[in-house]
Amino acid sequence: MDFKPSICFVASEIYPFSKTGGLADVMGVLPLTLHQMGYDVSVITPLYGRIATSEFSPNLVYEDLNVGYPWPDISADIFRASFYGMPVYFIDRGEYFDRRYYYCTYKGDYFDNCERFIFFCRAAMALMKKMGTAPDIVHSHDWHAALMNSYIYYQKRVDSFWADTSTVFTIHNLAFQGRFSVRLFWDCGLPYEAWNPDGVEYYDSFNLLKGGIAHADVVTTVSPSYAGEIVTAEFGCGLEGILQQKSDNLVGILNGADYNVWNPAQDKFLEANYSAENPEGKKVCKADLIASLCLPERLVERPVLGFIGRLRSQKGIDLLLDIIPDLVRKDVGLVVLGEGDAEYEAQLVNLVELYPDHVSGIVGYTEEMAHKIQAGADIFLMPSRYEPCGLTQMYSLRFGTPPIATAVGGLKDTITPYPNKDANGFIFNEPTSSGLLESIEEALEVFNNPIEWEELKLRGMRTDFSWVNSAKIYIETYRKMKEPVVKGIVSAVTK
Ligand code: ADP
Ligand code: GLC
């Protein structure tokens, strides 16, 4: 019989319990997909103050579990929820996690983020010990959970409990590294030897993500193209060197889309449901979006563009803001949903005031509005400067809202650009305002040809990014790690 490893995921967000972006979406579906494939899977995550779900309300399972950081007798309470049968463990320590925001306020990052996530990882280690069996695989995500890899790497040497545990570390965004002062390294619980340029040290700073890369058995990232990009100076955010060293054990596995959540055929937020087989409802959703944002009704007859995302330079929001006057001259509608840099938020608000008959901008985020825009817009904009995978373009494809995106990372891996015969969207090469505008002009020409547009749209709606395909590649990766002595584990899986 096939060996089925037990897998414990450690991550700072999981939808629907917590979310600031795509990491939460991935954590809300990948572990569950593996659980539904018959694997023994659990998730460990912080109990944020805003954990919202009466449906899966967590119960206290361990009280006062000793964590031993930042002082010897500090403890966490552990809650557990059954998420469609899969256990999700929540680390509760109010002063660290019960806050209005997850990582930062408008004034900047929380001053104690390093302490918070050292505490989180140490609590996750303590919880696994408390439960008595070490998982075969600990699969951690992004800088918040990166220390899991470093802890297990060194604990293995001194504690036989961890002897058979292997580690996988997934990078969702290399730009967020968790870099802190050396001062915070000294009592984090790693041995002195971890402080070196092949470990957690990065030019005299304590770099949690770097430690994750250095100490994990396998490093994955969320698309094949991004895996190729991050070993270059252009996209490597200063970590290209260590990623190159790791290249035998570095793999890009494309994210999937959760069609239980992002599917216009069964979406509870929408005014009407629709699908590739029965696409009429999209018109109702467009009219509803326009009405609910108090845009002029006549825009129903005009192309409406949508943007959903963090208002940051990564997402190329500045490129879009620059061309809003051009779009208005073309008499197209634009709906923007997001929050982020104060400067972009202010520009957006100004442009909405200038062009109220064409532009609607919502500074903030709600799931409901994200779904309504996915369904109600005609064209989805994603002019990212880099994009590890990107989920919103996969969702927009399913919602019949062809994406216009830059030729980077996962956008390249998920969009087949016009004029290919099997095109489902539009791609432009250089992340510039003029590149974006030209690509929009190209899309508008196709939009004006209803037959061609309908075909492009339906091809997008039928493009399938179900998670099960990606989950199988994770399984293969985990299995290979457990085979006796494989040099270049990932090479063995993918080559
Ligand atoms: P990223 O993770 O880089 O933001 P993705 O495309 O992978 O980009 O995932 C975005 C997910 O986060 C989608 O579900 C999208 O609707 C949602 N989202 C976009 N902007 C925000 C925001 N400001 N706050 C919370 N979620 C957001
Ligand atoms: C990150 C990336 C995004 C990716 C998401 C989920 O937030 O910016 O491209 O889709 O993680 O992996």
Image (tube, rainbow, N blue to C red):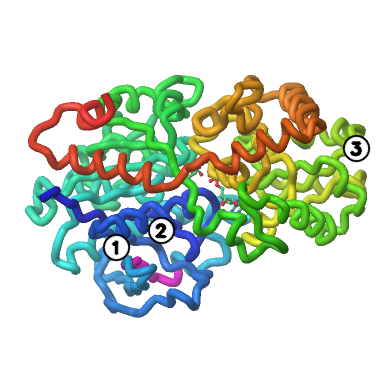
The amino acid type, in three-letter code, at marker 1 is Ala
Observer-nearest of 102 and 223:
223
**Toward the viewer: 57 or 1?**
1
Q: Residue at x 81, y 61 (%)?
A: 292
Quadrant of the frame with the C terminus: top left
Q: Nearer the viewer, residue 37 or 436?
A: 37
What secondary structure is found at the residue carrying circle 2? helix
From the image, state whether disc 1 or disc 2 is nearer to you.
Answer: 1
Residue 96 visible, this orientation:
yes
Give the number of the disc on residue 331: 3
| Residue drawn at the location 30% of the way across and 29% of the way down | 197
Mark 1 neighbour class, 10 Å CA radius: few under 14, some 14 to 19, many 20 or more:
many
Q: Is residue 365 left or right of residue 129?
A: right
Is residue 254 shown left or right of residue 41?
right
Q: Is residue 4 magenta?
A: no
| Residue 260 x/y as whole percent | 50, 58
Tell me whether circle 3 and circle 1 mark residues in contact (CB < 8 Å): no
- Which numbered circle lies on residue 116? 2
Around disc 3, counting alpha carbons within 10 Å, would you say few (fewer than 14), some (14 to 19), or many (20 or more)? some
Three-letter amino acid code of the residue under disc 3: Asp
Residue 350 appears in the picture as rendered: no
The quarter holding residue 198 reads: top left
Neighbours of disc 2 within 10 Å: few (<14), some (14-19), many (20+): many
Between 182 and 246, the one lying in front of the other is: 246
Stretch in magenta: 87-95
